[in-house]
Image (cartoon, rainbow, N blue to C red):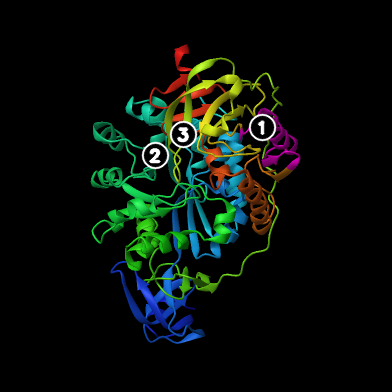
Amino acid sequence: MQSRIQKILDAARGRISADAVFRNSRIFNPFTCTWEEGSLAVKDGLVLGIGDYAGKKEYDLAGLYIVPGLIDAHAHIESSLLAPREYARLAATHGTTTVVADPHEIANVAGAEGLKFMLAESAGADIDILYMLPSCVPATPLDVGGAVLEAADLAPFTGCKGVIGLGEMMNVPGVLAGDPAIQEKLALFTLRDGHAPLLSGKDLNAYILAGFQSDHECTTRAEACEKLKKGMYIFIREGSIEQNIEELISIVTPATVSRCCFATDDCHADLLVGEGHIDRCIRKAVACGITPELAIRMATLSAAERFGLPDRGALVPGRRADFCVIDSPYRFVVHQVFRSGIPLVQGEFLEPAAPPSSFRCRMPSAEEIAIKGSGSARVIGLVPHQIITESLTRAVVGKDVPDLSRDILKVVVCNRYGNDAVGVGLVHGFGFEHGAVASSISHDAHNLVAVGTGDAAILSAIGEVIRSGGAMAAVIDQEKAVLPLSCAGLMSSLPFPLVAGQQEKLAEMTGRMGGIADPFMYLSFLSLTVIPVLRITDRGVFDTELFRDVPLFVKEE
């Protein structure tokens, strides 16, 4: 009896039939960035080659295009508001067959139990979900949430199926200071993702020397070029608000494409449903001026090579037959997806198991969120389509906040872990004229955060989130819209069409508030103290350049 390998070898040589042959197609080769007309043959889930093969099952693609399965180089699944299996069901419809994810959102909330939840919920998903273990839980020593994960806590996961490396290292000061705890985490893996927004010069040299190989935080072409020249992989990000393709895509050339990939980082379900996943990145990159071939190379082989995945990323002999059929390299509309050469049939919705809950948020009083005093105040300035902020100063009288004429709104952060801390600050850029929004998603500690045009509205929105045990809520007078997030206050337990539908209701209400589009995503990053410049936590205002808490009023220093 022939062994499996002998059968595959004989099929590759044309001596026996392939399992499937895809005729009259144009197959993309990312090694040469060219298209080859012909027939693609598959056996036992592996590519045999392109040629004159006979198959037990044959498909006539009538001149359509075949590209390798798309790969997302960096994502936080929790940011989609979907549990892993449901996220996979949605991503697969857009031609994605592999996602490299960092589960540090749920790890900050639920620690090792949160990691176990993500791994268990990823088993049997419609796509491959590979994990980089979270390197910064908490994001900084000051921002302890529901857990602290040291190297000893991560070590038991290093042998788990689907765990491939160490996730984004956000503690740049710790890296540059040679923190022994970080060194212990580095020893766990040779594959390590970086996170170094605006870092340059000799400090960037030291960060790379410490062992970090990639960055997805570039916001300017100059920043990306410097990191690229110094040997980093550049993940060009296009999330719900972190939109960097237009600024950065010109760095991609035939000489640099092997070091450039796409990353969605933080994308809500409604964007994934309405506009797509990595296919959306390809379309935008092409619209911004690069060739479809370079864009598809970024989305396939470049990502596979960066993560040491020699079994995917190209449709050449011996690699997995994961691919999608598209209408045109320019339009890039996905017609059908195949995994291991078999048509992907979307799996049924399975309600996720309940992860550990750490949501113990107390309702703050009106007195606790009041701003007392007056003078020159620090104001967080939103930057459209970015998660970095500006550090503004404005003359403020506390009792007159919010000041809608100058778009200065109050922002409140309530500790979700039961310690009763409440931080209050000011923010410019939301542009609300009515109401308030609140959410239990606020990177990375995921305390409750709210912004609004008055204290009553802010407290009402906070109350809706607390009553749901974690949610996204919008309030205008007595009208309310709420998306409960029953999975750790981060993700919904509902199927993706219902989640996207609930988001549409939230978007309709926030649209009537006036101001910036997608306010919940901007809201979710106001507390992230590893992104420049000014932030708000349950302790109050935080300056990332000084890397410490600072008073709201400058004169208090």
List the residue tagged with mark 1. Answer: 458
Tell me where residue 95 appears, x and y as whole percent.
Answer: 50, 65
**Can residue 141 be seen in this snapshot?**
no
Q: CA distance from mark 1 to mark 2?
A: 33 Å
The boundaries of the magenta stretch are: 450-479
Tell me where residue 191 appears, x and y as whole percent.
Answer: 38, 45
Residues packed near mark 2 inside 10 Å, few (<14), some (14 to 19) or many (20 plus): many
Secondary structure of the residue carrying numbered label 3:
strand
| Upstream in sequence: badge 1 or badge 3 | 3
| Upstream in sequence: badge 2 or badge 3 | 2
Residues packed near mark 1 inside 10 Å, few (<14), some (14 to 19) or many (20 plus): many
List the residue tagged with mark 3. Answer: 381
445 or 310: nearer the viewer: 445
Q: In the rendered view, does 289 fall on the left or right side of 407?
A: left
At 48% from the left edge and 27% from the top edge, which residue is drawn? 379
Q: CA distance from mark 1 to mark 3?
A: 19 Å
List the residue tagged with mark 2. Answer: 195
Quadrant of res 354:
top right
Three-letter code for the amino acid on which mark 2 is drawn: His
62 or 476: nearer the viewer: 476
Q: Is residue 427 above or below residue 100?
A: above
At 44% from the left edge and 43% from the top edge, which residue is drawn? 386
Task: Verify whether residue 470 appears in magenta.
Answer: yes
